[in-house]
Amino acid sequence: MDLVTIAVELYALMPDEFTAARNAKAKELGAAGEKELARQVRALPKASAAAWLVNMLVSRRREETDQVLELGAALREAQEELDPGQLKELGRRRHQLLAAIVKEGRSLAGELGHPISAAIGDEAEQTLRAAMADADAAAAVASGRLVRSLTASGLEPVELDGAVAGPLPSVRSARTGRPAKSTRPKVVEEPVPAGKRRADRAERAEQRKAEEAARASQQARAELERAEKRVAKAEAEAEKAQHRLQDVAARREELAGELAELKARMRELDKEIAAADREADIAQAVKEEAEAGLGKLEAEAYRARKRLDQLG
């Protein structure tokens, strides 16, 4: 895996996932002995809010983004051919397409849980406008590795220093008539044949396809990782619930045993109470008989005292 592929994957993440994922990847590469690549990955900067939005459009709304970049290429070609009618029509389409994709970008940001302000939307539109005006800027946007916004200024090439993470895609098209900034002496560029332009476009299309595949692979891996985490969490919760169920079942069995003992004891107590009731009945009868006998004896004693008093 090279730096470009890694960067494409990282810049397709949510802003709050980027730093941890970047550091984890650098650590993984370092452990695998790829020290230089690990250093390069660790140095990747976090994208600005506008750059993140453009990367998300490239990653998740590729067809719409390609329409913008293709219209930009058509505009640059019309400028070379000095076709006023076509330039007017393409300019009108540019205005409509930029407004539509920025609206789509704001909607996408909301769906992803990272809504953006109007200022960020304007900055993203400015970046896409620069990509339409400059072939290298278009390649930078299409890379999905943008880290800052871009600005087009007149006929000057768009400044791309520090705009892209990793190596800068260099596809400066001779159709613009604007060479890239260089410290070398200026040379007169030969016109690029139409076949070469088509080959350049095909090469850029292949590069976009490769980067899109890398982003799709990264998204699939991220989704798989999230799914595996959810499965692991669910398994842990199920295991915890199983342990709880076992504990409850054991406690229920213990309580059932105690209840059985209590029922047995209640039966014994019922028997003891019945026996005590019988004994009480017998005692009551004896008591009543004794009381009756006592009454007779007391009557006899009374009569005996009375006779004694009469004789006395």
Image (tube, rainbow, N blue to C red):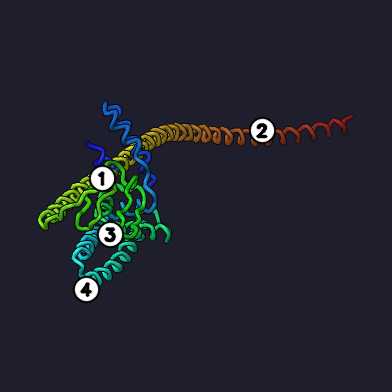
What amino acid type should be assigned to the residue bearing mark 2? Ala
Label 1 and label 2: CA atoms lie apart by 144 Å
Q: Earlier in the sequence, mark 3 or mark 2?
A: 3
For mark 3, what is the residue? 133
Nearer to us of marks 3 and 2 is 3
Label 3 with label 2: CB-CB less than 8 Å: no
Label 4 and label 1: CA atoms lie apart by 37 Å
Label 3 with label 1: CB-CB less than 8 Å: no
Count of labels shown?
A: 4
Point 78% across, 32% down: residue: 301
Q: Residue 219: horizontal and vertical position, in percent?
A: 26, 46
What amino acid type should be assigned to the residue bearing mark 1? Pro
Above or below 266: residue 76: below
For mark 4, what is the residue? 85
Q: Earlier in the sequence, mark 1 or mark 2?
A: 1
What amino acid type should be assigned to the residue bearing mark 4? Gly
Point 87% across, 30% down: residue: 311
Residue 175 lies in quadrant? bottom left
Label 1 with label 2: CB-CB less than 8 Å: no
Side (left or right) of 176 relative to 278: left
Q: Looking at this view, is 156 or 20 the one in front?
A: 156
Q: Residue furthest right?
A: 312
